[in-house]
Amino acid sequence: MTSSFFLIDNFRDIVDIPDALDDPELLKLGVLASGSIDTALFPYIGETTDGSITPLTGDNLKLAQNLCSLKTGSLWKAKKQNKDLAKYYNDLYEDELKKFILKLQATRTSRTKRVSVTTDYKTQQLFSQSKKF
């Protein structure tokens, strides 16, 4: 089961489509783009018990929705024979996807220069106890 990251209103704002005449076609392309994003993000997000990816929330969800709009825009412009804009949207999608994957891979330990190391507690004889008077 794939997640649905496609929001038609968000897509219309990005690609500048004012009317709803092409909505059925756009929805098909949006589902295709959403599946593509699922496939790309699956190794970095993980899965639930039913096999779908773990749901994204907050900023990560917004980024995934914007990625889906860019991918759908690329597919839509390619279908409409506008190769230059299709390439532009696809390049933008690839760059944003790389950044998003880096964000998902980042952990607190990889963002800091400080490293905390724990060692076993060792007891030693005090200097004054080792001397015999």
Image (tube, rainbow, N blue to C red):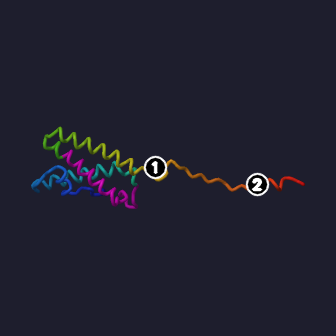
User: Left of 128 or right of it: where is 68?
Assistant: left
Residue type, label 1: Arg
- Dominant SS of magenta comes to helix
- From what the image shows, is residue 50 above or below residue 25? below
Mark 2 nearby-residue class (10 Å; few <14, some 14–19, many ≥20): few
Viewer-side residue, 104 vs 33: 104
Question: Marks 1/2: CA distance?
Answer: 36 Å
| Residue 63 on the magenta span | yes
Which quadrant of the view contains residue 9? bottom left
| Residue 126 on the magenta span | no
Residue 109: x %, y % from top left:
49, 51
Residue 120: x %, y % from top left:
67, 54
At x 30%, y 50%, the residue is: 37
The C terminus, quarter of image = bottom right
Q: Which residue is mark 1?
A: 111
Numbered disc 2: secondary structure: loop
Find residue 2 and name its label: none
Callout 1–callout 2 Cβ contact below 8 Å: no
Numbered disc 1: secondary structure: loop
At x 47%, y 53%, the residue is: 108
* Farthest-out residue, right: 133
Which quadrant of the view contains residue 82? top left
Start-end of magenta stretch: 46-75
Find residue 124 and name its label: 2
Viewer-side residue, 40 vs 110: 110
